[in-house]
Amino acid sequence: MNQQFSDKNKTSTWLLSLCLPLALVACGDSKDAAQASAPEAETPAVAVMSDVHFENVYGDLKNAKFSGIPTGDGKFATIRTMYAQLTSTRLFNENYFAFRGALDDAYAKGIRLVALSGDYSDDAQPVNIDGIAAILKEYQAKGMRFFIAPGNHDPNEPYDDDEAGKNDFLTAEGKEQKVYAVNYSGCKSQDASVACTNQLMELGYEKLITQLSEFGFMPNKADLYWETPFSNYADKTYSFDAALAGADIKNRQFEICAEGEGGSYKADGEKALGKAFSRCTSIIDSSYLVEPVKGVWLLSIDANVHIPNAAFDPVNARAFKGFDGAGNAGWNKVLTHKKHLLAWIKAVNARAKAQGKRLIAFSHYPTMDFYANQTDAMKAVFKSGAFQVARVPEAATTTAVTATGLQLHMGGHMHFNGTNEYKDASGNYFVNVQSPSLAVFGAAYKIVKYKDQDTVDIETVSLNNIARYNELFRYYQTEYDYLQNSSAASDISKRWNKDILSTKSYGEFTRYYFGELSRLRFMDEYWPCEMKEAATSLDGKQMLILSQLQTQVSFAQLKDVPGVLPLTASCMSKGTASGTPVSASQLSADWTVATAKAAQLATAAGYKLDDFAKISAYEFYGDFHRTVYAGELALRDMGTDRVRQYKVLMNAFPASPAAISMLDGKPSDQNPVHVVFQNQFKQVFSILKGLGSGKPSERFTINFKTQTLTSNNSSAASFN
């Protein structure tokens, strides 16, 4: 029976299912009695929303100096600049509306259980936590339940940061305004350019758990079951009072040291290390397991790992500066610094199987390669550290998590849409599903629904049409006008393309945002100089011709034949010509031959060569980065023709391009013109193909018995 409660009667039925366990708990029935009967063939669907990065765009900063932009209706827009958004890997403002849109969509589909897998706020400031709590309570009053897992932005540090803030709130004049917490240096020195308020401090665990307690962090009388990794009643009689006592902050801490987890793990760790652990302290783990409706277990895993660093002071162990951020640690450091979690997950999974529970685990961080197994190739081609490869889980990490027996994990953090699977030597099968962010291109949430004990359907719901998404555009216009009229170099450098304000939907807006993010940040940050020049200069037609080019004309000679192709030797090391170089004019003849070959490839695919010119450089590198983030969803956005044209390019390169001659760590300018491009972009297009041809990620079924992933989208585009 499909239990998508889409009308009032079905909602009443769902609410009754919450009240019934409450009555059982009140009567003192045991956990086993309350769970005696087997779950139905299907259980309610769960929506997973990740990386909301909620900012309260109409929040109260509680500061007389700067309240935001007056809106004319008694409110103030407390928003960040458009430039700040276009150079960030997440939006700050429009996701406010996207979050409401996602909740409305899920509610209309009858979904009443929502898991938020981290970064639900953008840095856990009181103004934003108050805002998201109000929205969750609003939808909770309509019958929805919310279950939170923490991300590296909530909290940023394990303890309150009262020096935090932002430089780029937008003023009514279109300028930037600094807003910081009161212990910020500029606030202490009474810097007139800074607005000071503790609404911008970043909250640590204690305040977050207290303020958001009703959203999973603490037990609810309506739940059939609730525990933490430190609970001691898993196999005993369950009661709400026992759960409430176990939920107290003082009962949810473990010892963490610079070198690894302490406590019962310390002796073995020190023995393996050969020396004593240092900088040890107790810290909160906010993980919990909850059974909100019969048969469904939600496992919220706190995979944040805040390791004590060189600034750690045992006398002031709660100072936020004494801990590293969790962003790059992820599950790799869970293995060493939160070992208790793996033991707990293994025990939870075993009990779930024994009791016939439908287990959905979620944390903020991915548990396996999230780049469609393209990580090694990306490391080889792009700049060191590009595309945040430091955050990719190591193979040993995936193996260790799989060994717990866990079968399904919903992750976030990377803002990606993707799926991957792993089978270990013992026969364990594990699937990691990456839920995309609501604040980027490919904005979407996941619906997870068990069909039976061994089968799960997962659907990706794209958020292309969001009400009010352009509500703030009039304020960005003021920013745009200010930047255009300013002669200050710092303002000129922040000018952006006004066309984004002409977009007609949230999907179109986020697509444009990602093109600008690529132009303003990614191309410099990720692409080596000569690759950036090619990617930002060549259209699809020129790329196809270059893939066929064979010439002896070198990069050093390009200055002598302007107009053939828009590349230079500016990124190259100056080498010394050897042998007898050909005349630079030979490039024109060689280009003509390559053009004829490219035209034949285009014709064979049903296109004209000029059709490939429609893939501008801006569209190409935008498509590449959109595919990195959205996978299958990006190909749908490209459309059939674009996908087919990219497939032509992917297959156009020589099987074994000539090696690049390097000099002082850079390509030599004595390389023939075609060599560098063919060598590098054959790899780029291979990576693009892999990213766009990964495991099913839009609509698919996981069968744990047959250990298979099956796409349910017959129209899904692919580069295969």
Image (spheres, rainbow, N blue to C red):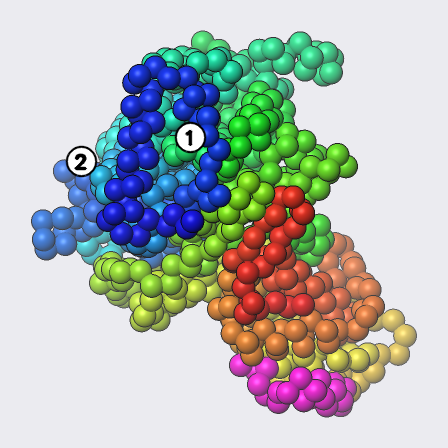
Q: Is residue 160 something one can see in this rendering?
A: no
Residue drawn 33% across the image and 69% down it:
503
Question: Where does residue 612 sit, x and y in percent of width and height?
Answer: 59, 82
Q: Looking at the rendered structure, which numbered label has been put on residue 291?
A: 1
Q: Looking at the rendered structure, which numbered label has been put on residue 62?
A: 2
Mark 1 against mark 2, which lies toward the viewer? 1
Residue type beneath disc 2: Lys
Q: Label 1's element?
A: strand
Q: Label 2's element?
A: loop
Sequence-earlier tag: 1 or 2: 2
Judged by its main secondary structure, the magenta piece is helix
Residue in front for this viewpoint, 666 or 431? 431
In the picture, the quarter occupied by the C terminus is bottom right
- Relative placement, left or right, of 105 versus 283 is left
Does residue 136 belong to the magenta stretch? no
Q: Which residues are magenta?
A: 589-614
What is the spatial separation of the Cα atoms under label 1 and label 2, in whole angstroms? 39 Å
